[in-house]
């Protein structure tokens, strides 16, 4: 138990350094590079989206510096920009829901006296990547996490090959942390189906890792789907079509229902907006 906790701690520290470097580099783009990245499609909401992204970047930097009082003010500013009609008009229903949840998570983390600095950083990083996905839809920063997550999957394979199930469980927890950091950004980028599948895969792998006597063939089969699952999430064509069933049937039904409900909500919202537009005219 002690060794498992120690291993998990080391993995979290190392991965935290890597993730922080990725996000901090995003704050240091020279003007020329920043302009080279893609811009929002509509000029009418470009300013609001740019301000939202800029404020989220400041929030992440203040959290990393330990300036929580300033971070709280940043969160309020992010919330203000998000509430403008121009920003929400550029988002899908799913994106609005995901981003509002991310903002709420940061608010709760920075207001809670029991929250740890790690929780502050994780929540701020999630929001930072989410707003960047809105501001730069064709080149979002969250795509840079592909290699990190692939290395996490490789680590799981290595621990399983060694028969180290404590290390396997610790690695699965770290992978989940990394994935949760980009999950909102992936939803904003329109990866709803892929996110549902990745959610199910990670939940399944974690469950296997926490079992006392897990079936080795079940673990092996799940791990074989790790790389294809993340290839699909990140839009990497190689192996993305090689996905095979690995989720229990009940989980698959829940995933299908979630996707169907999301589509219905989106269609209903679009229909409502068209109705309001026609009524106003």
Image: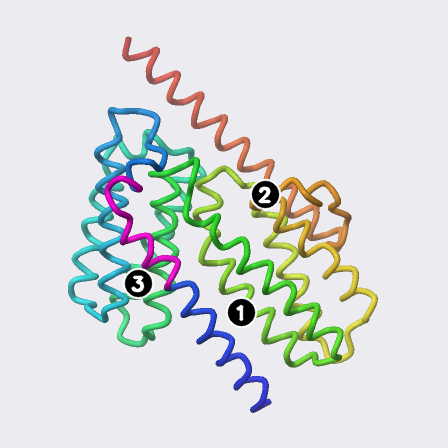
Marks 1/3 in contact by CB < 8 Å: the verdict is no
Residue nearer the viewer, 62 or 237: 237
Where residue 20 appears, as percent x and y from the top left, is 37, 64
Compared with 148, 138 (above or below) is above
Name the residue: 48% across, 30% down.
266
- The tag earlier along the polypeptide, 2 or 1, is 1
According to the picture, the residue beneath numbered tag 2 turns out to be 258
The residues tagged by marks 1 and 3 sit, at their Cα atoms, a distance apart of 22 Å
**Quadrant of the image containing the N terminus:** bottom right
Label 1 vs label 3, nearer the camera:
1
Residue found at the very far right of the displayed protein: 217
Where residue 230 appears, as percent x and y from the top left, is 61, 51
- The tag earlier along the polypeptide, 1 or 3, is 3
Question: For the magenta stretch, what is the residue range?
Answer: 21-33
According to the picture, the residue beneath numbered tag 3 turns out to be 108
According to the picture, the residue beneath numbered tag 1 turns out to be 174
Name the residue: 34% across, 66% down.
121
Compared with 179, 95 (above or below) is above
The residues tagged by marks 3 and 2 sit, at their Cα atoms, a distance apart of 26 Å
Tell me the SS state at disc 1. Answer: helix
Question: How is the structure coloured here?
Answer: rainbow
Marks 3/2 in contact by CB < 8 Å: the verdict is no
Residue found at the very far bottom of the displayed protein: 2
Give neighbour class at mark 1: few <14, some 14-19, many 20+ (Cα, 10 Å).
many
């Amino acid at each position: 138990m002690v060794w498992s906790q120690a291993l998990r701690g080391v993995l979290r520290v190392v991965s935290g350094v890597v993730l922080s470097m990725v996000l901090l580099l995003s704050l240091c783009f020279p003007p020329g590079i920043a302009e080279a990245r893609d811009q929002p499609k509509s000029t009418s909401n470009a300013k609001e989206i740019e301000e939202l992204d800029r404020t989220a970047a400041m929030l992440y930097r203040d959290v990393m510096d330990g300036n929580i009082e300033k971070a709280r003010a940043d969160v309020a500013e992010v919330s203000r920009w998000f509430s403008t009609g121009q920003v929400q008009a550029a988002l899908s229903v799913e994106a609005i829901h995901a981003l509002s949840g991310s903002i709420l998570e940061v608010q709760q983390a920075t207001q809670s006296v029991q929250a740890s600095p790690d929780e502050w950083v994780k929540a701020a990083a999630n929001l930072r990547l989410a707003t960047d996905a809105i501001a730069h839809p064709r080149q979002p920063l969250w795509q840079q996490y592909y290699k990190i997550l692939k290395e996490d999957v490789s680590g799981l394979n290595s621990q399983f090959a060694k028969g180290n199930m404590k290390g396997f469980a610790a690695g699965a927890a770290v992978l989940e942390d990394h994935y949760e950091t980009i999950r909102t950004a992936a939803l904003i980028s329109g990866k709803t189906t892929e996110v549902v599948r990745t959610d199910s895969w990670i939940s399944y792998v974690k469950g296997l890792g926490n079992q006392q006597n897990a079936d080795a063939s079940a673990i092996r089969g799940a791990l074989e789907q790790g790389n294809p699952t993340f290839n699909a999430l990140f839009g990497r064509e190689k192996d993305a079509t090689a996905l095979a069933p690995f989720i229990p049937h009940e989980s698959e039904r829940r995933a299908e229902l979630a996707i169907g409900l999301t589509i219905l909500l989106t269609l209903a919202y679009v229909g409502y907006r068209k109705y309001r537009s026609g009524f106003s005219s």
